[in-house]
Structures are given as structure tokens and as C-alpha cells.
Image (cartoon, rainbow, N blue to C red):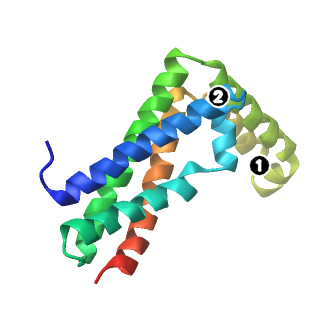
Amino acid sequence: MLKNPLLKTGAKFGIIGGFLAAILFIILYVLDQNPLLTTKKIPFGIILLPLLVFFSIKEFRDYFNGGELRFWQGLVTGFVNYLIIALISSVFIFVFLSYYDQELLQELINFNILNFERNKAGFIETFDEDTYEKVLADIRKTTVYHIALDDFARKMLIGFIATFIISIFLRK
């Protein structure tokens, strides 16, 4: 069991956030929305992830550290938090798409191809026909692994930025 309050607080909020991300995914799926498309429009990471980072760092500062926070303590607590959120969320997406509904991935691929083809003229004007065909082929080769890795990377980036900013504001 984690005894260090830095790790314990970050892990607690990370587990909560990871399960909230999975629940949001399931809710969108049950509402007959493709969560892979909908979460790009209403990103979990930009709204809920920074809130969870904020509350984990604030809880550590207020309840475990006597109202004081060093910058590095905020970074560690936040890192543990967003790392766990990103891991739970990406593993959930990987398992869900691999074993429950593979059609969601195909819908995402078709959506991305359609959007890319709509912008064909501008893309070819900026680059060239060969690059267009290569990017289109890459879109068609998208796998569950790519989607899970993308989710992980986005949450890690958002978490890092949020943790950095929040750690500056909450330190005393």
C-alpha cells in the first residue's frame, strides 16, 4: 500500500479520473454515440483532467503538508495523478475496442478518411499527390493500438501542462 502522501493522493485521484474516463466512454457508447468521435469534440482531458490534478495537489497541500507546497511536490502529485488516468483510460479503450466493439474503430477511420478527402485540394496544393496518398494509406492502417496510444499521449500532455501551471499557483 502507498504510504507516501505525495503518491497516495495522486494515485487516489488518478484512479477516480481513470474510472470517470471509462464511465464517460461507456455512457457515450450507450447513448449511441461513437466515443472516439465525441470525445474529440468534448475532450475529457481539457475539462476533467485539470480539475482532478488541481484537487489532488490541493488535497496534498492542505491535508498532508500543513498548507505548504513546494513546486516539486505539486509536480510529483500531479504526475502520479495524470499518469494513472492516462493508463487506465488507454488500457480501457484498447480492451473495449479489441474485444467488445471493433466497429467503433472503423467508424473513426471512415470519418477521418472522409474529412481528409474533403480537404484533398488544399492538402495537395500545400504538399503533393504522393504525400496525400501516403497519409491516406496511413489513416487506413489505423489500429486499436494507435487509438489507445493517442489517448495516452493526449492525456499525458494535458496533464503535464495542467500540473505545471497548477503547481505554480498552489505553492506557498
The mark lying in front, picked from 2 and 1, is 2
Hey, which residue is sitting farthest top in the picture? Answer: 99
Q: Residues within 10 Å of mark 1 (few under 14, many from 20)?
A: few
Q: Is residue 86 left or right of residue 30?
A: left
Residue annotated with mark 1: 128
Q: What residue is at 26 percent from the left and 62 percent from the top?
A: 76
Res 149 seen here: no
Hey, which residue is sitting farthest bottom in the picture? Answer: 172
Q: Please, what is the three-letter code of the amino acid marked with disc 2?
A: Tyr
Mark with earlier residue (2, 1): 2
Q: Secondary structure at mark 1?
A: loop
Instruction: Examine the rendered structure and indicate whether residue 67 appears above or below residue 30.
Output: below
Q: Please, what is the three-letter code of the amino acid marked with disc 1?
A: Asp
Q: Nearer the viewer, residue 16 or 103?
A: 16
Q: Nearer the viewer, residue 135 or 152?
A: 152
Q: Position of residue 63 (x, y in %)?
A: 24, 67
Q: Is residue 129 left or right of residue 100?
A: right
Q: Position of residue 71 (x, y in %)?
A: 27, 76
Residue annotated with mark 2: 29
